[in-house]
Structure formats: structure tokens, C-alpha cells
Image (tube, rainbow, N blue to C red):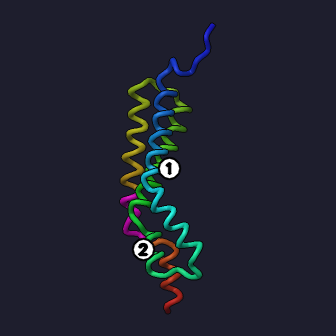
């Protein structure tokens, strides 16, 4: 009796989705390192650091990675067939992308805090 999870479709889709998360993280890795270096060197948030923190690419990548992770959890829980698994992960990518676009114009807590300091 052979016990292998890779005979099923959902583990393959889950591994592929993890690779998608890794690719999205690698895409924004240079931006993230630049923000990390700027935060380590800065004593206060200046306009250059603030603009790096509000980079839309970072927001979109993070939103998509979170959504794909939640899609992987759903695939692992439901254990659907191949096309349903691909549909779940594909839908999570689209939802993550559009949710990131919806939050694009919002002001974060950093801008609210800086606007309070100015008054």
C-alpha cells in the first residue's frame, strides 16, 4: 500500500501556489530591502522614506501574497480536484489584486499620525 499525497491534485496546486508566493516576494525584495535600510538609518520619517513605504507595488504584492496564502489554506481544507483547486487559487489572486487596488488610495496610520502632528 503506497501512501502519497501527490497522487491527488490539491497538493500540487498548493506547492505551485507557494512558488507563486515566493515569486511575488522576490519581485518586491529589492524594494523591501531599500525600505529596511532607510528605516534603519532614519531617525524620523522623511518624505523619501514615506514615499517608499507607500509604494503601490509593495501593497499589491503583499495583498496578493496574503490572499494566495488564504487560498492555499482553503485548498488544503477542502481538498478539491484539480480545476477547482486552480479556480480557488486563481480567484484568490484576483481578490488579492483588487483588494490591494481598493486600499491604494487610502491613507494609512502613518499619514494620519503625521497630519495630526502638523496641526
Q: Position of residue 74 (x, y in %)?
A: 52, 37
Q: How far apart are marks 1 and 2 (CA)?
A: 22 Å
Residue 88: assigned label:
none
Q: Position of residue 69 (x, y in %)?
A: 51, 44
Verify whether residue 62 appears in magenta: no
- In the depicted structure, whether residue 50 falls above or below residue 104: below
Q: Earlier in the sequence, mark 1 or mark 2?
A: 2
Is residue 8 or residue 44 the one in the foreground?
Answer: 44
Q: How many marks?
A: 2
Q: Which residue lies furthest to the bottom in this view?
A: 119
Q: Position of residue 38 (x, y in %)?
A: 53, 72
Is residue 10 or residue 21 the one in the foreground?
Answer: 21
Verify whether residue 103 appears in magenta: yes
Q: Are marks 1 and 2 in contact (CB under 8 Å)?
A: no
> Few, some or many C-alpha atoms within 10 Å of disc 2 (few <14, some 14-19, many ≥20)?
few
Magenta residues span 100-106
Q: Which of marks 1 and 2 is in front?
A: 2
- Disc 1 designates what residue? 66
At x 57%, y 76%, the residue is 41
Q: Which quarter of the figure is the N terminus placed in?
A: top right
Q: Is mark 2 on a helix, strand or loop?
A: helix
At x 44%, y 73%, the residue is 107
- Disc 2 designates what residue? 51
Q: Position of residue 21 (x, y in %)?
A: 48, 45
Amino acid at each position: 500500500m503506497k501512501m502519497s499525497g501527490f497522487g491527488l491534485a490539491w497538493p500540487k496546486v498548493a506547492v505551485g501556489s507557494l512558488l507563486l508566493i515566493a515569486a511575488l516576494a522576490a519581485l518586491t525584495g529589492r524594494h523591501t530591502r531599500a525600505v529596511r535600510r532607510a528605516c534603519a538609518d532614519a531617525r524620523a520619517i522623511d518624505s523619501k522614506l514615506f514615499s517608499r513605504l507607500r509604494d503601490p507595488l509593495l501593497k499589491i504584492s503583499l495583498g496578493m501574497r496574503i490572499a494566495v496564502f488564504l487560498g492555499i489554506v482553503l485548498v488544503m481544507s477542502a481538498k478539491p480536484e484539480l480545476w477547482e483547486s486552480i479556480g480557488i487559487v486563481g480567484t484568490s489572486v484576483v481578490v488579492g489584486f483588487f483588494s490591494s487596488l481598493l486600499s491604494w488610495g487610502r491613507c494609512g496610520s502613518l499619514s494620519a499620525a503625521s497630519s495630526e502632528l502638523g496641526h
